[in-house]
Image (cartoon, grey):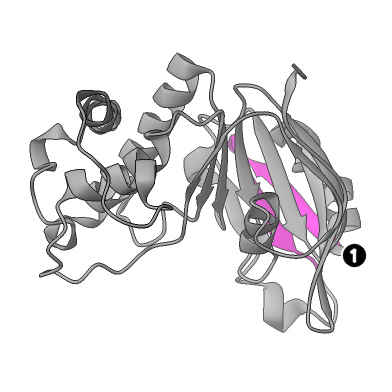
Amino acid sequence: MSEAALEVSGLSVSQGRVEVLRGVGFELPRGAFCGLIGSNGAGKTTLLRAILGLLPSQGQIKANGRIGYVPQKILFEPDLPVRARDFVALGLDGHRFGLAFPSRARAEKVEAALRAVEAEGFAGQRIGRLSGGQQQRVMIAHALVRSPDLLLLDEPLANLDIKAAAEIIALLRRLSQESGMTVLLSAHDMNPLLPVMDRILYLAGGSALCGSVHDVVRTEVLSALYGYHIDVIRVHGRVLVVAGGGEHDHRYDHEHVTAIP
């Protein structure tokens, strides 16, 4: 099998008359933890959906193994009569019509997924009554129950407090290290991911750059990606990514400021 978990080349995706992604290409090695970084509207969700085959696209996408997917935040009604354990089980057979026959092997897979995300303590509770961090653990267990080789997560840290986000990141890193699973996680802020990222995939203007944080987060590299000047400033062990001067100032000054410890 290929050493790459995911190979993308010449990927272009349009929505209507708008070209969201243009000639995107990158590879992720097996077991890598990659942050997919970009502002709102940069095409992060579009890229993930294209990898899943949910959008028409041009180019080549080759995933070497089974893919798991955690979509953006789902709003669960508090009184929804679905336990966390039941929701995880849907990851095994939710694509089929009708009810699945219970079996010991099926139950063991569900319980193993719950243990992997440390959700056993609330597995019997209604999913709509769980906290945001607990719901995210259940969503990840739902994706893990079929033992994916590549796990895609679309903004899993959105709407979580700092503590819950840090716990989810640590959880995903542990799962990746223990199983060799490749993780591609989208976010608009790279800061929480810096301790765990092996790769950063940076999206802007329909194009992408992939590499180490040191290689990608540089003035000349990001300026070429955005098509206008970007300042990467290192101060007291931190890195600031700030949009430079020009006609775009008022739109981007706040949106594209990122601090890296």
Is residue 116 found left or right of 4 in the rendered image?
A: left
Residue 218 visible from this viewpoint: no
Magenta stretch: dominant secondary structure: strand
Looking at the rendered structure, the number of numbered marks drawn on it comes to 1
User: Who is closer to the viewer here, 169 or 15?
Assistant: 15
Q: Is residue 232 above or below residue 106?
A: below
Q: From the image, which quarter does the C terminus lie in?
A: top right
Is residue 77 found left or right of 155 in the rendered image?
A: left
Extent of the magenta region: 229-244
The secondary structure type at the circle numbered 1 is loop
Asked whether residue 36 is drawn in magenta, I would say no
User: Who is closer to the viewer here, 255 or 89?
Assistant: 89
| Residue 45 in which image quadrant | bottom right
**Residue position for label 1:** 227
Asked whether residue 235 is drawn in magenta, I would say yes
Name the residue: 77% across, 19% down.
2
Name the residue: 75% across, 49% down.
232
| Residue 13 in which image quadrant | bottom right
User: Who is closer to the viewer here, 18 or 145?
Assistant: 145
